[in-house]
Image (cartoon, helix red, strand yellow):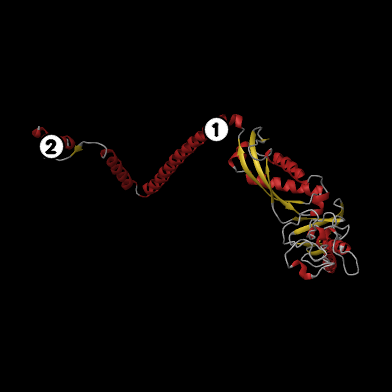
Amino acid sequence: MDGWRERLGAGLKGLAMAGKNNPWGGGPGGDESSGDDGGGGDGGAGGDGPRNPWLPGGSEPGKRRSASIEDIFKSRGPEGPRRAGGGPGFRLPERPGGKSWLPVLIAGTALVWVAVTSVHFVQPGEQAVVTWFGGKYSHELSSGTNFTAPWPIQQVEKENVTQVRLEEVPGTKTEKLILTGDQNLVDLSYLIRWNISDLTLYKYQLSDPQNALLEIGEAAMRAAVARQKLDTVLTGAGRAEIEQDVRTAMQARLDAYRSGISVQGIEINKVDPPSRVEEAFKDVSSAQQDADAAINRARAVAQQVLARAQGDAREFDDIYAEYKLAPEVTRRRLYYETMEQILSKTDKTIVESGNVTPYLPLPELKRRAQAAPQQQGQ
């Protein structure tokens, strides 16, 4: 601000020097009232003063005109007019004593840069690794506020190690055929849930940890499916066992590689036959289901027959025990029960009496009695 004040004072001083000859009639050889009479461009008795700028004829030959603002500023010297955009003649304001503010600005910018790039906040559940110039490993940062050398001397890489990440194998609209234990192929897709357990090992132990995770997962899945039969894999009876075997095998291999990865779980999404034999496989499955249904029905009938036979045998044993206690009574009871069962299924009635016909066709008489009203109505 002091520099700008100095420059403003210099401009006012130049304006005063340029106005020695009063454009309203003052100047050498005349008084201030010479321009008030409104006559002529001489500005006084001598005629050497500038013409009144408010009167016409300022451009006539031999006539002097007043100095413009451009002329005043051009007369200041080689610096010329100031430009707000920093063009020719632009200079930064100076501190008192003629010193520039540029070193102060540079130092302030450097301090802000150091403060911003040297202070790091590591949240709970995060891990951070410090490297020299973005390449060589330096050390790890703990949770909380940490300080390092400014960028680019030291760089910090942070990762959320509690976040569970998902990898879908083999991806959407892609067929992955795996051989089962009974030499059949299945189209199988699965999901790997994992997270970072050690950021330093994850960053610097393996060149491509995610690709290693996928390769290890595929090898473990093929080995686990190869120990199961096709029906077990398709029906879902062995899926839980396969998922557990794959997770255990993957974690053991990743720990051996010191990968810094923890496998949280394996989920089998789809198990289908190959697309080229899908129709034939459906026919086979349908036939197998029909066979299973027939077998189940036969087993049900066999169980009913066996239960009935066992009941009859138990009943015979009970009757035999009673027969040994009272043979004559048991014999008569068996006779009566047997005749009751036989005669209940015939339409003939036999009555043993001297005054009644021995054979009385009661059902036939009943049918005749029902047919007689119908004939009369016709």
Residue sitting farthest toward the front? 45
User: Helix or strand or loop: what does disc 1 sit on?
Assistant: helix
Query: Which quadrant of the figure contains the C terminus?
Result: top left
Quadrant of the image occupied by residue 239: top right
Where does the image place residue 242, in percent across and percent down from the top left? 66, 44
Q: Earlier in the sequence, mark 1 or mark 2?
A: 1
Where does the image place residue 362, in percent across and percent down from the top left? 17, 37
Q: Nearer the viewer, residue 347 or 43?
A: 43
Residue at horizontal 74 percent and vertical 63 percent from the top = 39
Q: Which residue is mark 1?
A: 282
Q: Is residue 173 visible?
A: yes
Q: Nearer the viewer, residue 172 or 65?
A: 65
Q: Nearer the viewer, residue 153 or 377?
A: 153
**Would you place residue 260 above or below residue 44 in this image?**
above
Q: Residues within 10 Å of mark 2 (few under 14, many from 20)?
A: few
Q: Is residue 147 visible?
A: no
- Total labels drawn: 2
Residue sitting farthest toward the left? 376
Which circle marks residue 348 in the picture?
none
- Residue type, numbered disc 2: Ala
Q: Residues within 10 Å of mark 1 (few under 14, many from 20)?
A: few
- Residue type, numbered disc 1: Lys
Residue at horizontal 81 percent and vertical 55 percent from the top = 62
Where does the image place residue 287, in percent across and percent down from the top left? 52, 32
User: Helix or strand or loop: what does disc 2 sit on?
Assistant: helix
Residue at horizontal 55 percent and vertical 32 percent from the top = 282
Which circle marks residue 369 in the picture?
2
Left or right of residue 107: residue 277: left
